[in-house]
Amino acid sequence: MRALVLAATIAIALIAAPAASAAFGISQFSAQPASKAAGANSDFSVSFDVSDPGAGLRDLTVHLPPGLIGNPLATPTCSEAKLKADACPAKSDVGDATNGVNVKPLGLLPIPLTVNGQVYNVEPRKGEPARFGIVLDPSPVPGLGGALPKIVLQQTASLRQGDFGLDTGLKDIPRSAKIAGISTPLEVTSVELTLKGKVNGGKGFLRNPTSCGAQTVSIDAKAYNGANASGQDQFTTTNCGALPFSPKFAATIRQVSRDLADPVELTTSISQTIEEAGLEKAVVKLPTDIIGNGPALAIQCEAAAFDAGNCPADTKVGEATAASPLQAKPLAGSVYLVKPVSPSPFPDLGVDLKGGLALKVKGAISAVAVPSGLQIVVTFDGLPDIPLSDFSLTFAGGPGGLNVAGRDPCQPPPFVFGADFDAHSGAARHVDANAKATCKGGGAGRPKARVGIAKLRSGHPKLKLRVRAGGEQIRRARVRLPRGLKVGPKRKLLGGSHAAGGSVRGHGRTLSLKAKGGGADRLRVRLAKGAIKAGKGVRAKRLKAFRIRVVDTSGSATALSVRAAE
């Protein structure tokens, strides 16, 4: 009977067999979103057929247009171990896959099958912005007394530095599998993959570019026999005017010494929401009271060395961070002075950000004459269409610093920064911002502190403590808790404490705070989950004051007495 079934299967294969096969190639390539609206969370489908599938599709890379990105934080991630065991949680499902496969039992003519599967959001490896897993669950093969085993593939993603678009690819696609214990050749004949625009009740996952116009998607494929193939498709995004665009700008100036001739520390920050059109160009105009430090500007990194990540240490002038709603951890890196490619009296600012979405961007420095003097202007153009909730640059002060304040920044009038922003959608916005300043010599007064407390009756209250620097940065602070409160066990303190700007330790009724890097403008501490314990009957109104001793970077100590607010 089995021989008869096998004979019938061979007969079917003979009837279905093509008369001739073409060279390896990609045909009928299609890459289209369900909605063409700019910035829309839309399903996106890619499909194609394989010419000469016998060559064996091995590697596949899809080049997405800039701005077509996924949010790996929209769903829980699946570990690689669970993916391989086909045990990914349903909430990590982000798409569907359908492959056409030829099965060639015993080297006979191919039997065509359609194989369906799911796409999962997989925990990315170090340095990756995202990773996807595909689990294909084939149906039984007619006449062979078994089915193909589940096929598990992993799809990587990387950011192109040329245009900041994403590349996503598969490598070493299997070309054989065991059926009923027999190794059987497989040939991929077609591929269809759909990623979801929204997941888990409406959370945005895949987002269209926020620019309008033609968007190009291309594909490169490689066969096991060494042949290469490619394909290309386009779609046009529309309705850019519907996207909001309201970026915010802030600046802070901090004196690092009492000598106004010494460069100041300067921080600028641009922030957006994920719903907004992406920022394409930012022009920041410094107040004329800030001038450049000539000796520092003269030490520059070669452009090729910056591109290779090999700038000398003496060309570094600051630090950069870029927080994205698409990444669990902010990008962080250094800012360098880079020799411009085109002749210019000023160097470029090279920002080298590390992390899952690692990228390098350059800003041009220029100077223009205005009625109040010479104004320094920094322009970042061609920024990636990636949502950034905060993009901050901090330029170091002191010897070798880049920016010199021509007067005391803590004395009126305030230092006013101007910023002009252009969106990928075509929208524009202007912002003026008064810089916040921290100065030596008492310009900011004494240190200050606030304490908030809640859920005292539970015996495991929540405590919030904020300490702000005075004329000098905070080095450390000691907090003496009032009677009725005490620090919980060490493991509870470690698990239930969060400190911004430093670290926290404690024992008995004493908390010790230490600033990160030797000095901080603010220390913020939150304690919960048993990190602080309260006695029975303790009420906020009956608590005596928290006694706080603040030691600044000059060694001066200030005693504060602060009552808790509920």
Image: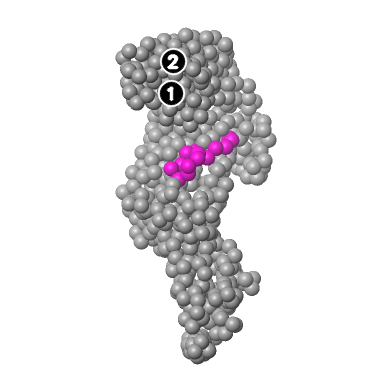
- SS for callout 2: loop
At horizontal 47% and vertical 9% (from top left) the residue drawn is: 559
Q: Nearer the viewer, residue 48 or 422?
A: 48
At horizontal 62% and vertical 32% (from top left) the residue drawn is: 316
Q: Residues within 10 Å of mark 1 (few under 14, many from 20)?
A: many
Q: Position of residue 312 (x, y in %)?
A: 68, 35
At horizontal 50% and vertical 67% (from top left) the residue drawn is: 150
Q: Position of residue 285 (x, y in %)?
A: 46, 31
Q: Position of residue 457 (x, y in %)?
A: 33, 23
- Position of 93 with respect to 494 (left or right) is left
Residue 549: mark? none
Q: Position of residue 370 (x, y in %)?
A: 46, 27
Q: Is residue 334 above or below residue 142?
A: above
Q: Nearer the viewer, residue 46 or 283?
A: 46
Mark 1 or 2, nearer chain start: 2
- Position of 382 with respect to 455 (left or right) is right
Kindly indicate the quadrant of the structure image that contains residue 61. bottom right
Q: Nearer the viewer, residue 354 or 291?
A: 354
Question: What separation in Å lies between label 1 and label 2 (alpha carbons)?
Answer: 10 Å
Q: Are marks 1 and 2 in contact (CB under 8 Å)?
A: yes
Specify the quadrant that holds the C terminus.
top left
At horizontal 51% and vertical 26% (from top left) the residue drawn is: 490
Q: Which residue is mark 1?
A: 532
Q: Nearer the viewer, residue 141 or 125?
A: 141
Q: Which residue is mark 2?
A: 481
| Residue 420 visible, this angle | no
Residue span colored magenta? 322-335
Q: Amino acid at mark 1?
A: Ile
Q: Is residue 217 above or below residue 149?
A: above
- SS for callout 1: strand
